[in-house]
Amino acid sequence: MQISAEQQSQLKQIPGVDLLLELLKQDSYFDPVPNTVKLNAIRLVVANLRDQILKTPANISSDSFAETTLLSEVKRLVASDMTPNLRRVINATGIVVHTNLGRSLLADKVVENLAMIARRYSNLEYDLAKGKRGSRYSSVEGLLCELTGAEAALAVNNNAGAVLLSLETIARDRKVIVSRGELVEIGGSFRVPDVMAKSGGILREVGTTNRTHLRDYENAIESDTALLLKVHRSNYSVVGFTAEVPLKELVALGNRRQIPVMEDLGSGTFIDFSQYGLMKEPTVRDSIAAGPDVVTFSGDKLLGGPQAGIIVGKKHWLDRIKQNPIARALRIDKLTLAALEGTLRLYRDPADAIASIPTLRLLTQPKSMIDRNADQLYQALKQMDTAKIEVERVESISKSGGGSLPLLDLPTTCIRVKVAQISANAIEKMMRRYDPPVIGRIEDDSFLLDIRTVQEDEISTIVTAFQKLLQEIVP
């Protein structure tokens, strides 16, 4: 590539890294910034300017070399680099258990205890009564057994890990019978057949996509059958001409043929949502009462705790699962344990759990409360320049999310916003860049804020975000 005389002249005007670094010392903003961050930002600014000269020299003005211009760009890059990658956002999508936005929120009491455990030493693997090493799972096993009716319990890193560990322990190199209609795929393209293959279990499909009968399982049993597996379709539903075998009948078959039975509940719950006007979802206690040997489910999602995979069931099988070397690779740390224990303790009082655990509260909150918060945001936005912003209240539907309750439609109120001269996509992008980012959804070329998932103390933040948006882009 041949460099013109104009480009050579421009390249010579680029200040050196050392000079810019010295100039940074005159601005107290950069005092707490590590040298590596400052150097990286300066080098990137210099490199970007060099690239622009080499590609489009005609677009380079004298202002491009001004110290104020360069230092302003350095400051922008430094601010971006010093901002944590994992940040708080405002969820205005209406999806309660939003996988991309961190799934379940922890209860305030849980967060308080979590902070204490994080700051201090703890008896993670120390038996205070005996004065010697103990099990890290003792803090949650008793609670899990109390709440589910199981004989024993174990917590691992997530439900896929719980399923993998259980299958590897019970059915490695042997056959696992499962209904074809239950071979689900969860988020991130993780599929039950793939998890089973990694566990060493041999998949034996029975039935059809929409109908599976008890005789299908019974006819498939062979000498090397290790397990009858039932998978709850927590992230989709089959309707119409359908049939599936209830867990209790599958357990009876397993008992007759002396084959263990396992159920993967996916999004497990301790709450009967039908008591709150929502659709019936099997609880973990319901499943345990049916008599399976092992039940697995998630610690977050509908449970409203931290990401974890929980295994409950009969002591004979749980003892074997705990002794599997893979259990150590999948074990959870002290912070997850602290958050899980705190969440489980709230379930001892179901009313307290509904009021304290954000996921349960957001799913069961009355429409009148959503309307009240929606009106507060609506009135605040209506106070802005009506020539620049158009605001409307609309009735809509929220979703549970997180691969749970796929057929559940939650009535909600949204605030629809249009801004003069810019598209809904532009609004969405600018709100996403605000601090904290406001994540909504787009419908009919409008930006929608679903109030079900907006916390009451976040309304003023949303108002400020729109005020800034109007100041920046609308003349």
Image: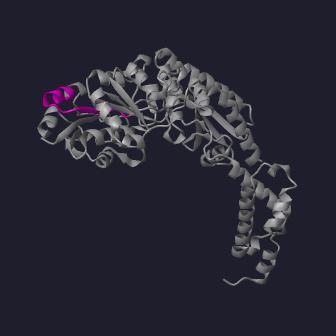
- What is the residue that sits farthest to the right in this orientation? 26
Residue 97 drawn in magenta: no
Q: Say which quarter of the image contains residue 287.
A: top left
Is residue 182 shown above or below 339?
A: below
Segment colored magenta:
250-266
Is residue 303 shown above or below 88?
A: above
Q: Is residue 444 visible?
A: yes
Q: Is residue 267 visible?
A: no
Q: Percent x, y for residue 68?
A: 85, 59
Residue at the image position 38 percent from the left and 40 percent from the top? 327
Viewer-proximal residue, 28 or 304?
28
Q: Is residue 27 left or right of residue 84?
A: right
Q: Is residue 133 left or right of residue 442?
A: left
Residue at the image position 52 percent from the left and 26 percent from the top? 362
Q: Tell me how the rendering is colored.
A: one colour
Residue at the image position 59 percent from the left and 31 percent from the top? 121
Residue at the image position 59 percent from the left and 42 percent from the top? 446
Q: Percent x, y for residue 36?
A: 72, 57
Q: Percent x, y for residue 48?
A: 71, 66
Q: Percent x, y for residue 54?
A: 71, 75
Residue 252 drawn in magenta: yes
Viewer-proximal residue, 82 or 70?
82
Is residue 57 shown above or below 373?
A: below
Is residue 227 shown above or below 347?
A: below
Q: Split into 4 quadrants, where in the image is the N terminus?
A: bottom right
